[in-house]
Image (cartoon, rainbow, N blue to C red):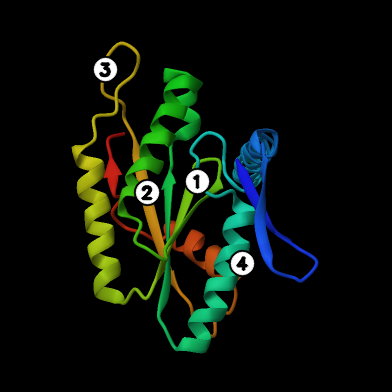
Amino acid sequence: WHVSASDLADPRGEVEGRVLIFHDTTERWQAEQELRAATDALTAANRELTRLVTHDPLTRTLQRSAFLRQTQEECARARRGGREVRLLTVRLENLAELNASAGSEVADQVLRALARLLESMRREGDLLGRTGAAEFALLMSEAGELQTERTVEELRRGLERSRFRDARGRSLALCVRHGIAMLDDATPDADELLAASARSVEHTAVPLLDGT
């Protein structure tokens, strides 16, 4: 309820009473609640739409285009602030063979597991995206050489601890390689940085995991 009041005055201007008017605001309150609920639902729907547009539906990591756009923004900030930035590419080398031998559902499970492992390693300010059918990229902000080595070793241990199995419980033979590139004059933007990191995968002597 809302109450409004006004004074009653005689001809001489002296107050001789007060009028109280009670307003039932139930309908207005209900309308405000409905509007608030509708606004919250619209906000949630917009967030979900943004996620669907920018994220890979299988692994829930950033899609390639969204990853490159956000990486470009981070690279610009890093250059202005004089910060080191490195990009780690992780590739499941035998995805095609895995699809053929174990089926697409098992292959998808492996990709999701790999994405979860990388997500668990992502620090605040880092970016994780699926940049190819069998490839992920982790942009590491403010990551020097030592931090990068620690991240790679953490990933290696995580892969070794993981138990990748098919529908019958048999161990899967997987080959996972990685490559690293640093933001510098040779890799001035996101596209060049990602390309350099992907190329370095081919030159990695020892795979992170090699069960093939």
Kindly identify which residue carries mark 4.
Answer: 191
**Among the 4 quarters of the image, the one containing residue 26:** top right
- Residue type marked 1: Thr
Residue at (28, 54) in percent of width and height: 206
Cα separation, mark 4 vs mark 3, equals 39 Å
**Label 3 to label 2: alpha-carbon separation:** 26 Å
> The residue under label 2 is which amino acid type?
Glu
Q: x%, y% of residue 27?
A: 69, 33
Mark 4 belongs to which amino acid? Asp
Q: Which residue is mark 2?
A: 119
Closer to the camera: disc 3 or disc 1? 1
* Residue closest to the eye, 120 or 18: 18
Dot 1 or dot 4: first in sequence order is 1
Q: Quick one: label 3 or label 1, which is nearer the N terminus?
A: 1
Give the numbered dot on residue 170. Answer: 3
Left/right of residue 98 with respect to residue 27 in the rendered view: left
Q: Are marks 1 and 2 in contact (CB under 8 Å)?
A: yes
Quadrant containing the C terminus in the rendered view: top left
Point out the residue furthest to the top here: 168
Query: Quarter of the image containing the N terminus?
Result: top right
Which residue carries the number 1 mark?
A: 61
Marks 1 and 2 sit apart, C-alpha to C-alpha, by 8 Å
Find out whether the residues at labels 3 and 1 contact each other: C-beta distance under 8 Å: no
Residue found 60% across the figure and 75% down from its top: 189
Distance from the alpha carbon under mark 1 to that under mark 4: 18 Å
Q: Position of residue 199 (x, y in %)?
A: 50, 62
> Which is closer to the viewer, label 3 or label 2?
2
Name the residue: 26% across, 23% down: 171
Disc 1 crowd, CA 10 A, few/some/many (<14, 14-19, 20+): many
